[in-house]
Amino acid sequence: MENEINKLPTGLIPVNHYLCPGMAETKAYHEFGDFLQQRFPGKVQKISIHAGFTCPNRDGSKGWGGCTYCNNQTFSPEYCHTEKSITKQLEEGIRFFSRKYPEMNYLAYFQAYTNTYEEMSRLVQKYEEALAYPKVEGLIIGTRPDCVPDELLEYFESLSRKTFVLIEYGLESTLNRTLERINRGHTYEDSVSAILRTAGRGIPAGAHLILGLPGESREEILSHADRLSELPLTSLKLHQLQLIKNTRMGREYAGHPEAFHLYSVEEYIDLVIDFMERLHPAIAVERFVSQSPKELLIAPAWGLKNFEFTAKVKRRFKERNTFQGRLYSPRS
């Protein structure tokens, strides 16, 4: 086991050896919150920012119309609007959280669309504006794996020596046929290249994956865990496929519902547990589901908050007496 620990991403240990800070409790999976606690002395909170960027598959560079499932209204907080400056968005977001947690520090989360898709000088200006705001301790940059030139990674590498930086890549699937079907405009090979180049510079790399995309069998979904486990990932976000109004996928579902498998809550929980058993134990998992506004959601309508779903997952881990990485086996 000691030799395997030495092969893991820097600063992480296998989940079955991972104790909750300050508590003699072994956790069933490596939580992203604990990952942050390893790096910050106090509590930190992400503040979402809409920096006014677009995507290469929206502006014609790679395609038009964006990903077939995408409606950015589903994850933009009320304070997060393009007519507001980055400083204003941070001010309003921090004001909201600081009422309850006055000692909290913050991470500026560039979330909406592709946050590395712009001229270098404009990107740096926006990042630096966020970092200049009081109590902002670092950046999380959400982007696509085909939009990270080496010049920008060099900047992030330099920046990471002074502050926290995590680059979060939207992979969504490891199957190229799925990526083509949902109009991602990039390949899984692009994802592998971006993660390797990022981690190779000592910058934490995160990934985002949707479980249940049309055309993927259960075994193919679980195989994503095997493929991601081969990569030097620091963190992972999972969420269920959600069908959203005013999207091409929503219209596709209306015309051909038989092409989709929409999981029940209990069925999806077991899928998540099976996935986690095969996932590298060092990868910190930030979430299992996403919660879209009711007025935009077509299906599935589970009626659960994220924390309620997470509690169900933790309970199911205990019922099955299992943990993240139980079935993980390094490939030679």
Image: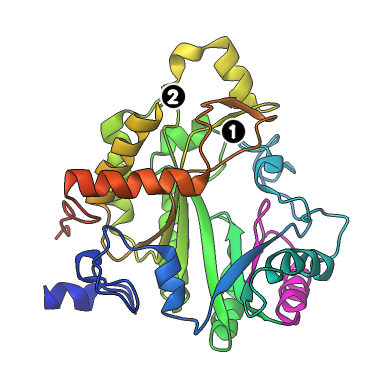
Residue occupying image coordinates x 31% and y 37%: 271
The circle on residue 69 is: 1
Residue 114 in magenta stretch:
yes
Residue occupying image coordinates x 55% and y 75%: 165
Image location of residue 214, percent across then percent down: 44, 26
Image location of residue 83, percent across then percent down: 88, 55
Q: Closest to the observer: 34 or 117?
A: 34
Occupied quadrant, residue 245: top right
Occupied quadrant, residue 299: top right
Let me know if residue 197 appears in the view.
no
Number of on-image labels:
2
Q: Which residues are magenta?
A: 107-134
The quadrant the N terminus occupies is bottom left
**Mark 1 or 2, nearer chain start:** 1
The circle on residue 261 is: none
Residue topped by disc 2 = 262
**Quick one: label 2, few (<14), some, or many (20+) residues within 10 Å?**
some
Verify CB contact (< 8 Å) between mark 1 and mark 2: no
* 135 to the left or right of 313: right
